[in-house]
Amino acid sequence: MTSVRSAIEAANQEGRAALIGYLPAGYPSVEGSIELVRCMVKAGVDIVEVGLPYSDPVMDGPTIQAAAEAALAAGTRTTDIFRVVEASAALAPTVVMTYWNPVERFGVDRFAASLADAGGAGLITPDLIPDEADEWIEAAGHHGLDKIFLVAPSSTRERLEMTCRASSGFVYATAVMGVTGARDQSSTAAPELVHRVREVTDLPVGVGLGVSNGQQAAEVSSFADAVIVGSALVRVIAEAADSAGALSALGELTGDLALGVRREL
Amino acid sequence: MSVPASNPMPDAAGHFGRFGGRFMPEALIAPLDELEQHWRKAMADEAFVADFNNLLREYAGLPSLLYDAERFSEAVGARVLLKREDLNHTGAHKIRNVLGQALLTTKMGKQRVIAETGAGQHGVATATACAYFGLDCVVYMGEVDTERQALNVARMRMLGAEVIPVMSGSRTLKDAINEALRDWVANVDDTHYLLGTAAGAHPFPAMVRDFTRGIGDESRAQALELLGHLPDAALACVGGGSNAIGMFAALIPDESVRLYGFEAAGDGYQTGRHAATITAGQIGVLHGARSYLLQDEDGQTLESHSISAGLDYPGVGPEHAWLAETGRATYLPVTDAQAMDSMALLAKTEGIIPAIESAHALAGVPGVVADLGGDAELLVCLSGRGDKDMDTAAKWFELVDEADLVAEIERK
């Protein structure tokens, strides 16, 4: 199985950033989300990020909030995430993005073991900082999982060093001070943050928050190792009239993003 | 209001034992560090402390009275001293916290304040402090609550605040907190998040405790003067837990004083319709801290239920979780019906209509008397006044015949 890091590095050797696509598990249904993930991989994402729906997603904007609410209302359970990961990991390296409480409730080691069993590569933890992550770091080491922590424009040099030391796979740089959601304007803070991260680590740097089209993907691709897209993908699914429409719109946008990361500016 | 050496919690990373901490997006860690630095500096600054105490005295009407409630005492069979926080400006203990944090906001050079509110009491208190200090104020309030508490929406707007109805999730207090956090992460350069209770990520639980600890500091001195000795127990209601921690902080080192927190048990903590987090919740992480919370088996937050909007929250401050685990304080459930009975009892015996929140503490008195005996002298935090609850009380006790009222309005 290709690791997340080597998938990013392989893309980088082609002179481009890797494309990471986010979709919430269980939206619109568990089976439906598996089909959407397959579509997204076929259309060109290098790495899949599967979200575990949570009742209180403080880092997410309206698009992903609504999808998480719908997934929970449809009865999505923590164990469902492993089914989605299993299907996805057969096609591309797959990580899970989750708020911390569902992991703690499931049991940190048990969650790590189940994720590893399903072929998952690691966890992105938006509300868990390394300072609070002893139990997760131990479980990740035990089960061979990547610990993908976030850095932000507000992170001090000291925190960048500490967070990168605790990370593996890649470092998730949040491009803006804000929540997830497609934005018209590209972030001006992102290039500087990536530069600061590179001063303290050799790990690949992925940039997320606000990328919504091929042009923005091309811009981010020029300075980052990976481009992470979430809300824009969820939005085209939410706006589609039916599941066939969702698949076609998702494929089209993913294709545009995949061309974007390959485009010379 | 300084923190005595005998009260070393939390540790440097904001932990109360295994509770508390900072479960927050990295983007907010630097702002939380900055807030902690400003707060610690302010607490050590005599000029800040003098300004704060002056505000409390001249503007909020503090210290509040400690009232020897003889008629209520006779009814419940033990001597009860009421800490009259209901007489404070804006009608509750919450003015202490908002004045402290608003003063700190001005020292941080920030011009904009955001807050969450459930029933609207913290929103009104925040809007009041912002009006006083000339700060821009935005209050997030669940859409369901804006409908239930339209009068408080009007009060906040009258004070110059912008009230934003929150349409996400369950559209109540917890979602208002989520939305305030989303605003904060996007606007943290010029904005302070004025959290209304002793919960959330470090330093909020410790900071809110220190701004409200005057309740216990004053009560302790007043009780010593009135009784000649310390009371046997202190009682307070617990939602997030700001009035209770404000009452307990000064008394934690006094081991002879038992501490009791009363949680909202709604229809009964066994029914699933309650807000008794410590009694019937499990340990988890919500809104930035590890504590007890109401959650399902997947760790999704459950909706809480209480007749008292101020206690209707599925979490609780981490210091209370720690005090419960160490046994220093005891947390017990009080149902809606018990609280409403006590509300009526205080109104009829003393001519004081308490907030329904505070009535939960009063409802705890008989159980404590059963524990400690009729000689016990009890200090009870009367955290707020009941004017805001008259609509609820009128329905509960059927004080108003609605059909008659409608007919009368139609006649006019």
Image: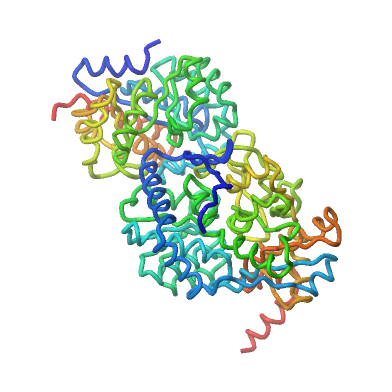
**Is residue B311 at all visible to an observer of this figure?**
no
Query: Residue A154 appears at what percent x and percent y?
Result: 31, 41
Point 80% across, 56% down: residue: B368
Point 39% across, 63% down: residue: B47
Q: Residue furthest bottom?
A: B412
Q: Residue furthest front?
A: B228
Point 36% across, 47% down: residue: B34
**Looking at the image, is B353 positioned above or below residue B43?**
below
Query: Residue B270 appears at what percent x and percent y?
Result: 76, 46
Query: Residue A24 appears at what percent x and percent y?
Result: 46, 33
**Looking at the image, is A240 positioned above or below residue A261?**
below
**Looking at the image, is A215 positioned above or below residue B112?**
above
Label tally: 0
Left-right relation of B363 to A144: right
Point 44% across, 20% down: residue: A88
Residue A123, image quadrant: top left
Q: Nearer the viewer, residue B39 or B99?
A: B39
Left-right relation of A131 to B108: right
Q: Nearer the viewer, residue A228 or B218?
A: B218
The quarter of the image holding the N terminus of chain A is top left
Query: Residue A5 appears at what percent x and percent y?
Result: 33, 17
**Looking at the image, is B219 positioned above or below residue B184?**
below
The quarter of the image holding the C terminus of chain A is top left
Q: Nearer the viewer, residue B389 or A183?
A: B389
Q: Residue furthest top?
A: A1
**Is residue A185 at all visible to an observer of this figure?**
yes
